[in-house]
Image (cartoon, grey):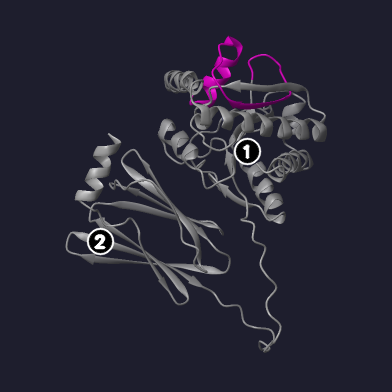
């Protein structure tokens, strides 16, 4: 199948999606569309997100390294694709649509915004200090759920707390020179189809990043509290399955995705690269888990393995944290508090930095 796909690419080279142009002062991305193609744009300070329906590009992750754009990523989904453009600071996005019969071109220009200089630049005879050679580390933070999917609801709503924690964590890591990719930076789902949604999040755990952390809030039919940290693995523990099914989309869908992830778990046992990655995931899990317990004094529910769909195929260290129970009368209320969330975010950052500094 892979060979066939390869041959098709050779025999019928499609136009790149997007076509990229580097110009003085701006980076241009051109999307060739059909008249029926729908798209939506949204933008945060560091990411421009374009969602297309009715296109079928290949997945890609491309470093641009222009002064305006760091990279872009194309993530195919059912019936379309999402393109994430990672923006540099001090840029403005301008879009133009050009109609040409039944073809359309969406032109996205990412333009440098020059700050007015305080002082005229001075001629200097001193050479610039050498830039540090080490590559910045990049981590992917997944704020669980979002948009139409609230996740667990109790004294707090899971999707709100996970987003808040992800944004706090992003800020803390950036202060330490770590690059952060968020799977979402507002109250939104990535797809209204949960399997596609989880697949798109998982796709972001690609080999150009250093690690992946998915943040969740727990809930239980009985009163329970505490913090759990997971890395991927097969489980036969029936007490875990209800929770895993819920995080995997719930209901019939959750059961199906859990079975799928379980079968990935069985295959991984024979996959050496995956096994060595799991070792790093376990290490990351212990560092993050320990830091969270120390910072919060929360009940220790352990580091465990379970078939969470969102981390099933990660080729970088990947964990899923359940930072507390939404419906516990004390823990749920603690999770409402800004100081408690900040303590959690700082602990997550600390665990992640410890792992990165160990060469992870
Ligand atoms: Zn969740």
| Residue ID at (68%, 31%) | 283
Check if residue 235 falls in the magenta segment: yes
Give the image quarter of residue 329: top right
Does residue 320 show up?
A: no
Whether label 2 lies within 8 Å of ligand 1 gets the answer no
Q: Which residue is mark 2?
A: 104
Nearest the eye: 242 or 318: 318
Report the residue at 35% width, 58% height from top.
Answer: 18
Quadrant housing residue 35: bottom left
* Magenta extent: 220-249
- Crowding near the residue tagged with mark 1, few <14, some 14–19, many ≥20 C-alpha atoms within 10 Å: many
- Mark 1 or mark 2: which comes first in sequence? 2
Q: Position of residue 98 (x, y in %)?
A: 27, 67
Q: Which mark is residue 316?
A: none
Give how far apart the Cα atoms at labels 1 and 2 are: 38 Å
Q: Element type at marker 1?
A: helix
**Toward which corner of the image does residue 253 lie, by quadrant?**
top left
Look at the image and tell me whether residue 103 can be seen.
yes
Give coordinates of residue 151: x percent, y percent.
56, 30
Residue placed under numbered mark 1 in the picture: 162
Q: Quadrant of the C terminus?
A: top right
From the viewer's perspective, tell me whether residue 22 is left or right of residue 183: left
In the current view of this chain or complex, which residue is farthest to the front? Answer: 272
Q: Quadrant of the N terminus?
A: top left
333 left or right of 21?
right
Vertical placement of 103 versus 347: above or below?
A: below
Disc 1 C-beta below 8 A from ligand 1: yes
Q: Give x and y (percent) for residue 339.
A: 79, 42
Residue 197: x %, y % from top left: 45, 36
Q: Residues within 10 Å of mark 2 (few under 14, many from 20)?
A: some
């Amino acid at each position: 199948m892979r060979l066939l796909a390869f041959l098709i690419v050779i025999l019928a080279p499609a136009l790149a999606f997007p076509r990229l142009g580097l110009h003085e002062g701006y980076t241009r991305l051109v999307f060739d569309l059909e008249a029926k193609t729908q798209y939506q744009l949204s933008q945060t300070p560091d990411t421009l997100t374009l969602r297309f329906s009715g296109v079928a590009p290949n997945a890609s992750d491309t470093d641009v390294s222009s002064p305006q754009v760091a990279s872009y990523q194309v993530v195919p989904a059912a019936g379309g694709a999402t393109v994430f453009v990672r923006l540099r600071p001090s840029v403005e996005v301008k879009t133009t649509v050009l109609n040409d019969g039944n073809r359309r071109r969406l032109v996205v220009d990412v333009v440098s915004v020059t700050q007015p200089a305080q002082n005229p630049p001075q001629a200097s005879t001193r050479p610039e200090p050498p830039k540090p050679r080490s590559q910045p580390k990049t981590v992917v933070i997944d704020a669980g759920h979002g948009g139409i999917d609230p996740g667990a609801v109790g004294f707090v709503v899971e999707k709100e707390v996970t987003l808040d924690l992800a944004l706090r964590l992003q800020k803390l890591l950036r202060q330490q020179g770590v690059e952060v990719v968020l799977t979402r930076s507002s109250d939104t789902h990535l797809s209204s189809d949960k399997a596609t949604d989880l697949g798109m999040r998982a796709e972001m755990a690609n080999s150009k990043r250093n690690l992946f952390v998915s943040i969740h809030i727990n809930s239980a039919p009985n009163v329970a509290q505490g913090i759990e940290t997971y890395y991927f693995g097969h489980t036969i523990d029936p007490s875990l399955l209800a929770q895993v099914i819920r995080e995997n989309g719930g209901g019939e869908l959750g059961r199906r995705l859990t079975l799928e992830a379980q079968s990935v778990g069985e295959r991984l046992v024979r996959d050496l690269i995956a096994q060595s990655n799991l070792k790093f995931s376990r290490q990351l899990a212990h560092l993050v888990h320990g830091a969270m317990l120390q910072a919060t004094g929360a009940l220790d529910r352990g580091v465990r393995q379970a078939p969470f769909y969102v981390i099933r195929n990660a080729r970088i260290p990947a964990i899923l944290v359940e930072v507390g129970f939404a419906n516990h009368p004390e823990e749920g209320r603690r999770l409402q508090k800004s100081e408690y969330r900040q303590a959690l975010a700082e602990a997550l950052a600390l665990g992640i930095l410890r792992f990165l500094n160990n060469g992870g």
